[in-house]
Image (spheres, helix red, strand yellow):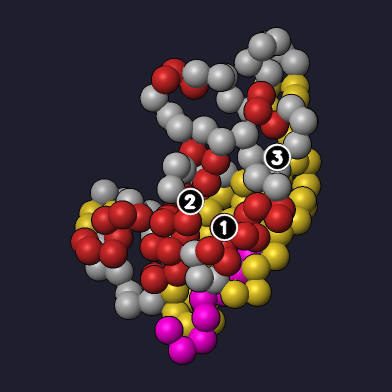
Amino acid sequence: MTGVFRRKIAARSGGKLRCLLGELTGALAAGSTNGGEQEQLPQAYDLALSHMTFHHIDDIVGTLRMLRELLKPGGRVAVFDLLKEPGSDKFHKPDHGGSVFHVGGFAPEKMTQLLQDAGFVGAEAQAVTDFQKESYQHPGQLNTFRLLMATAAAPEGT
């Protein structure tokens, strides 16, 4: 999946954008893994993007703070994740194998507050689209979920 994303970014940005993959907790200290090779990270980024990740993170504010530290002043964060609404807790099996933390999505107000608590400014969040996923309870049946988009900026002068 990362290779496909990299090719799309390269083709559509004229070489102005670059996709890096790595462990966020290691990114601040060690760099990023790019295709299996260690890569030194630039000092700061213009954009940090997360897609369907935060509902698996226990320390959301701490993780958002790490992202903020990687951004240039005024740099943007965009978080796409599961919107909390009736039925969003059915996105994953309740025990999810017992190995993965899971929150059943986020209300726009909650995600906005989490971004503000992490030191971002101008936080906004809203539902942007519906998507479907096969039901774990009824194989072959599709459940519809909504995607939340939240954006904010790192403060200028940090």
Q: Is residue 4 left or right of residue 132?
A: left
**Rendered residue at 65%/60% (across/down):** 112
The x, y position of residue 35, in whole percent, is 31, 51
Amino acid, disc 2:
Ile
Where disc 2 sits, the SS reads: helix
Q: Main secondary structure of the magenta part?
A: loop
**Rendered residue at 43%/29% (across/down):** 100
The x, y position of residue 6, in whole percent, is 47, 57
Question: Mark 2 = which residue?
Answer: 60
Q: Quadrant of the C terminus?
A: bottom left
Q: CA distance from mark 1 to mark 2?
A: 7 Å
**Nearest the camera: 135 or 90?**
90
> Can residue 67 be seen by looking at this rendering?
no
Question: Mark 1 = which residue?
Answer: 114
Q: Which is nearer the N-term, disc 3 or disc 1?
A: 3
Amino acid, disc 1:
Leu
Q: Is residue 150 above or below residue 158?
A: above
Would residue 152 be counted in the magenta stretch? yes
Residue stretch in magenta = 151-158
Question: Mark 3 = which residue?
Answer: 84
Q: CA distance from mark 3 to mark 2?
A: 15 Å
**Rendered residue at 48%/51% (across/down):** 60
Q: Are marks 3 and 2 in contact (CB under 8 Å)?
A: no
**Rendered residue at 77%/52% (across/down):** 128
Amino acid, disc 3:
Lys
Q: CA distance from mark 3 to mark 1?
A: 14 Å
Where disc 1 sits, the SS reads: helix
Q: Which is nearer the N-term, disc 1 or disc 2?
A: 2
